[in-house]
Amino acid sequence: QVKLVESGGGLVQTGGSLRLSCVASGSFSIKDMAWYRQAPGNQRELVAAITTGGSTNYADFVKGRFTISRDNAKNELYLQMNSLNPEDTAVYYCYAEQAIGVIIRYWGQGTQVTVSS
C-alpha cells in the first residue's frame, strides 16, 4: 500500500510561483510519478510526469513554466510552478505507480492552487 500526501498549494497572484511537494510512504517499487490537476467542471488532466530515471514529460500548457522533479531517496515528488495565471487554478493531485508484478495506481488527496488575477 502506498500513501501520497501533497502540500504547498495556496493562493497566489498572477505571475507568482508555488512549489508543490508530495511525500510517498510505503513506497516500495514506485515507478513513474506525475502531477495531475482538475479544475471545476473539467476532467482531470496530466500536468507533468517523471520516470524513476528522471525522464520528464509536460503538458503543452505548462512547458517552460513548470518543472517536475523527484528525490528517489526521500520518496518525494515536486512541482515548481512559475508564471502562474488564473487558468492554472485547480486541485493538483500527486500520482504514483507501484510495480509489483502488476501496476497499481495511487492518488493523493489533492492540494488547491488558486491564482488570482
Image (tube, grey):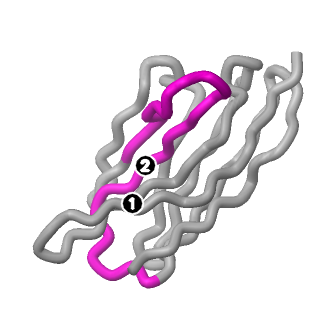
Give the side of residue 30 with respect to residue 9, left or right: left
Q: Quadrant of residue 57?
A: top left
Q: Nearer the viewer, residue 54 or 27?
A: 27
Residue displayed at 67% across by 27% down: 40
Quadrant where the C terminus lies? top right
Q: Is residue 20 above or below residue 52?
A: above
Residue at the image point whose x is 87% and y is 38% from the top: 11
Instruction: Name the residue type under label 1.
Output: Ala
Q: In which quadrant of the rendered view does residue 60 lie? A: top left
The span shown in magenta is 26-49
For badge 2, the amino acid type reads: Ala
- Taking depth in this image into account, of 77 and 42 the one nearest to the observer is 42
Q: Is residue 45 above or below residue 73?
A: above
| SS category of the residue bearing label 2 | strand
Cβ–Cβ under 8 Å for marks 1 and 2: yes
Residue at 80% in and 33% down: 114
Does the stretch in magenta take in 69?
Answer: no
Which residue occupies the extreme left position in the image? Answer: 101
